[in-house]
Image (cartoon, rainbow, N blue to C red):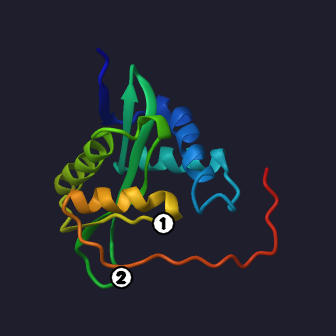
Amino acid sequence: MTEYRVRAAQVQDIPAIIEIARGMHDESSYAPLRFDGRWLAANLQHMLDNGQGLFCATLEDVVVGGIICYTDRTIFSLDLVAFEHVLYLAPEHRRGRLALRLVKKFIDWAKAKGCVQIRPGVTTGDVGKNAVLLYKAAGFQQVGETFVMDIAVEIEHA
């Protein structure tokens, strides 16, 4: 029986992460924005080079999802806070506890980084409703809402 693994991402995972991220982009409220795999690759490389959190969920060494996290200080404090850019699993891998395992990896990573708070966000629209339930189940408290306003007339997709 094959098992899912959650592990730190490596440079050679970047192409697979880009494809997984494309899936998240296409099914979320981010779809109107142009997807740029080169920009994402550069950002992922920068995050890997600077010790930020990139974790893959794999099945038989194939990337099926992941979580991309980073640390920063808020405008109000020098305390270190962990944030999440993306938590995503391909639709066929969403059953079970894999997403929770990714969130627990995020929590452990944030603790190891010395963060005093973790602030994930769900900004993907309706598709993110399950993520809200997931974060609540993992012990997070919901403290806000996300808003968006399209201000460009029309964006040409590449």
Among numbered discs 2 and 1, the one appearing first in the sequence: 2
Q: Is residue 90 visible?
A: no
Q: Relative to residue 104, is residue 90 depicted above or below? A: above
The structure residue drawn at horizontal position 47% and vertical position 32%, both measured from the top left corner, is 13
Task: Give the mark toward the camera: 2 or 1.
Answer: 1
Residue at which label 2 appears: 75
Crowding near the residue tagged with mark 1, few <14, some 14–19, many ≥20 C-alpha atoms within 10 Å: some
Front one among 48 and 62:
62
Q: Position of residue 145 (x, y in %)?
A: 42, 78
Residue at which label 1 appears: 123
Q: Position of residue 16 (x, y in %)?
A: 53, 33
The structure residue drawn at horizontal position 76% and vertical position 75%, both measured from the top left corner, is 152
Q: Amino acid at mark 1?
A: Thr
The structure residue drawn at horizontal position 38% and vertical position 29%, both measured from the top left corner, is 58
The structure residue drawn at horizontal position 31% and vertical position 34%, both measured from the top left corner, is 7
Front one among 148 and 73:
148
Q: Relative to residue 76, is residue 14 depicted above or below? A: above
Q: Position of residue 53 (x, y in %)?
A: 34, 49
Where disc 1 sits, the SS reads: loop
Q: Amino acid at mark 2?
A: Ile
